Amino acid sequence: MSLSNLSSAQLAQLIGLIKEKETLQARLEKVDAALQALESGKSVPKKRGRKPGRPASVKVGAPKGRRTKRLKAAMLKALSSAGSSGVTVKELATKLKVKPGNIFSWFYTTGKKIKGITKVGEAKYAYHG
């Protein structure tokens, strides 16, 4: 097999296989080390804590109540400035720097409690109040 005659798809497959081989070799080395530790009479440490690269759950920022009130005021301001034609969720998300999923969730939880908010079209809302 000549490396100069490989297509890009074959090269990508080869790279993937090499990466998989390296990860399997690293796991095998860990197992070998654990076996050697058992043979020598040492105890094998138990797995503890989080997986590497996974952040700890830390609550940062304002408490939930203040955050929703701030979003509510911003949402109502943006909706009322859009007028009766309304504004899309995507536009609201970019304007308020919030994920579109959070905007949808806001409409289905907090938004449905506010009189005057109506759905004008697909993913489009208006405020008449």
Image (cartoon, rainbow, N blue to C red):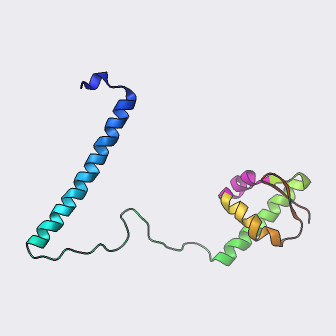
Residue 2 seen in this snapshot: yes
Residue drawn at 86 percent across, 60 percent down:
80
Q: Position of residue 51 (x, y in %)?
A: 37, 66
Image position of 27 (left or right of 33): right
Using the image, determine if residue 46 lies above or below residue 82: below
Which image quadrant is residue 43 in?
bottom left
Residue at the spot 81% in from the left edge and 64% down from the top edge: 76
- Residue 124 vs 66, above or below: the answer is above
39 left or right of 99? left
Q: Quadrant of residue 104?
A: bottom right
Residue 92 lies in magenta, yes or no?
A: yes
Horizontally, residue 34 falls left or right of residue 87, namely: left
Point 15% across, 67% down: residue: 35
Q: Main secondary structure of the magenta part?
A: helix
Q: Nearer the viewer, residue 103 or 2?
A: 2
Residue 68 drawn at (x, y percent): 70, 72
Residue in the image at 39% along x and 62% along y: 53
The answer to whether residue 56 is magenta is no
The image quadrant that residue 71 belongs to is bottom right
Quadrant location of the C terminus in the rendered image: bottom right
Give how far across and how far down residue 106 sits, in percent: 73, 66
Residue 70 placement, left or right of 50: right
Q: Which residues are magenta?
A: 88-100
